[in-house]
Amino acid sequence: ALGFALARDLQGKEHKVVAVIGDGAMTGGLAFEGMNNAGSLRKNLLVILNDNTWSISKNVGSISKYLTGIMADEKFQRLRSEVWELTGKFKRRDKIRETIKGLENSIKGFLVPGMLFEKLGFKYFGPIDGHDLPLLIKTLEDLKQINGPVMLHIATTKGKGYSPAEDDAFKYHGIGKFDKVTGKAAASSANLPAYTNVFGKIMCELAEKDKQVVAITAAMCSGTGLVEYSEKYPERFFDVGIAEAHATTFAGGLAADGIKPYLSIYSTFLQRAYDQVIHDLAIQKLPVVICMDRAGLVGEDGPTHHGVFDIAYLSTIPSLTLCAPKDGNELRSMLHHTVEHPQDGIVAVRYPRDTVPVAMTDEVQPIAWGKWEWLTLPSQMTILAVGAMVHAALQASQALSEKGVDIAVVNARFIKPFDPTMLEQIKAESRVIVTIEEGQLRGGFGQAIAENLLSSGWDGKFKAMAIPDGFVTHGSRAQLLKDVALDPASIAANLEQFLSQQAKGNGGFLQRLILNGLTRRKDIVKNVG
């Protein structure tokens, strides 16, 4: 908004600029950076702070409303200006003005919570009832006449006018399909738990196992599955608000003094803390475990929420281990390993907004840390599948197997660093290597593998399947996976097309691979169905 205001003035235009911000966002430093700059530039700008009582301050009642009405009124503003001009005629004008300003601030500070904004250079008004439209309209009309940065603080009720949302604002903050009459959400047909819920259960297990375990989230207690944990271990649970950069540095401080922090953040929101991940965690090699929910395509929340960049932006950071479990049981194994064997540096674990593909077991299976996993017998064609793409790759492999094309599947659960021993084995045995990941193609796992193959002189055929360079729109997760050709049917079709293209340029290439596949049938391990 400040950019718009400055652009307006530079071009000699006269329109109004209004920014509307929610109170939850006031925990983020960016809002204060903008206000600090706006206060110094003194541009005409109105900021409306919509406070739904979830964060900043409570409605202070009719006195505040009355005072705001007076202060915002044009007559009051003109009177204040005249008094200010009048005091300028006295010899001791500075002392007199200081006294008047101090008196005004004392009254306002006692009755309204706006002095912070005043100190940042804003004229503060409010809070007023945001549902009182006549008052709101009159106030906005009056504020049009005031020059410089202005802050209007309005108090509203979350879900106002719809009783189910008023009674349970948290639930209705982000909800899928529901009956508008009863307010009940549509029943889920899934028999398997969501990764988010599995993660929450695992965190409770870790906290019970080790008293040094703490959980940190950035205003996403429910969204990251930590409600049960927060109730069982309130002294070891920290919701820092919408402040991912602070959450990351906070976790670093805890880790530096012997605590075991598990930082739970949506993949897309961890982007806000990229600088802190590098400078406050990685350089010090601090053992913080970053648990990235919503990694990959998240569905209807759209481009702002798709967690498709984490593989690319985290893979560039030294002393960081990036892993992606194929299912909930493997997620459990990874997290239990981190609490039993703290790593020399960051461990980042990515998992999707989806249900786990197989049922959870009772036992925690040990994991060979840093090692990939064969899910089939080796073959001359191998898929390196990452995280949620493992089961899609297995289904695509099975579909091609029925056509006589034998493709091995490897669970490439450690993205960085990848398993060098198994990769060398695959390079020695395979003539075709394919990578599949639910992340951006550019800078992703596939391109890292391609660099290894090229620099080592491997002379086989390679293909990387990932999300194309671009932003993915809104839609169900299943539909979006089809749109980017990462559903099982699309994977199988693309593999078949790729092999056919190679066969045209290399006589007998495909035929030899099919002949090899007919003599070696798959042996899919039981734990992946």
Image: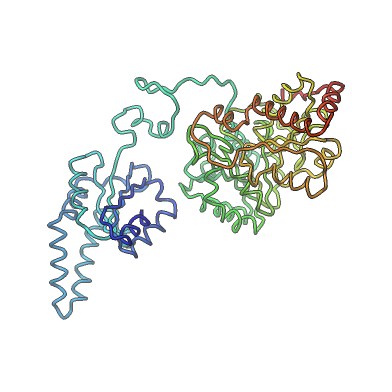
Name the image quarter holding the C terminus.
Answer: top right
37 vs 256, nearest the viewer: 37
Residue 339 seen in this snapshot? no
Task: Please name whichever residue, 235 or 292, is drawn nearer the observer in this view of the structure.
Answer: 292
Q: Is residue 455 left or right of residue 142?
A: right
- In which quarter of the view is residue 204 placed? top right
Tally the numbered discs. 0
Q: Residue placed at 58% from the left, 41% from the top?
A: 308
- Residue 158 figure quarter: top left
Q: Quadrant of residue 406?
A: top right
Residue 3 position, x and y percent, is: 38, 56
Identity of the residue drawn at 83% across and 47% down: 457
Residue 235 x %, y %: 52, 45
Q: Residue at x 64, y 55 (%)?
A: 282
Compared across the picture, whether 99 is left or right of 504 comes to left
Q: Is residue 271 visible?
A: yes
Q: Position of residue 513 (x, y in %)?
A: 83, 28
- Find residue 423 and report its horizontal and vertical position in percent: 80, 41
Q: From this view, report whether residue 164 is shown above or below residue 50.
A: above
Vertical comparison of 310 with 392: above or below: below
